[in-house]
Amino acid sequence: MRKLVHPKVLILDEVGYLSLDSTQASLVFQVLCHRYDRNQSIILTSNKAFGEWGEVFAGDAVMASAALDRLLHRSTVLNIRGESYRLKEKRQAGISWVEPILEPPTKPSGSGEGKMPTP
């Protein structure tokens, strides 16, 4: 915990990319509270709307609300809208279609379809 409250600026990138379990959510909340009480800076990025933060904090809407209360009290919110710079670069490189990252599994071809390999 000391490593997270010691720096002059703490950067939390992609908050909400992965959901936190209850222990992780509690620890993140404690860090936010500690830094808030000491007027220490936090830079936080997220693609989650504030209304979706309950999901991020292990389904605990009360904890999410309390975290947002502290984060937003003395903050400047920059809401950046528009196309992802990664997708924009792909389009500029001449790639007009970007395949989805998660695709459904395809059926194996051949006569062994559906069989498990034997050791």
Image (tube, grey):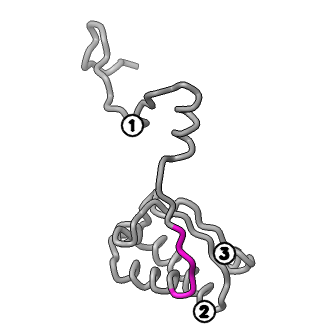
**Residue 37 shows which numbered tag?**
2
Q: Amino acid at mark 2?
A: Asp
Question: Is 77 within the magenta?
Answer: yes
Label 1, residues with CA under 10 Å away: few <14, some 14-19, many ≥20: few
**Separation (CA) of disc 1 from disc 3:** 33 Å
User: On the rendered structure, is 74 left or right of 49?
Assistant: right
**Residue 4 shows which numbered tag?**
3
Q: Secondary structure at mark 1?
A: loop
Name, please, the residue furthest toward the bottom: 37
In the rendered image, residue 60, in percent from the top left (x then y), is placed at 34, 76
In this rendered view, identify the residue nearer to me: 82 or 105: 82
Question: Which of the 4 image quadrants contains residue 30?
Answer: bottom right
- Which residue is identified by label 1? 102
Question: Which of the 4 image quadrants contains residue 88?
Answer: top right
**Separation (CA) of disc 3 from disc 2:** 14 Å
Tell me the quadrant of the picture where the N terminus can be found.
bottom right
Q: Amino acid at mark 1?
A: Leu
Q: Amino acid at mark 3?
A: Leu
**Separation (CA) of disc 1 from disc 2:** 41 Å
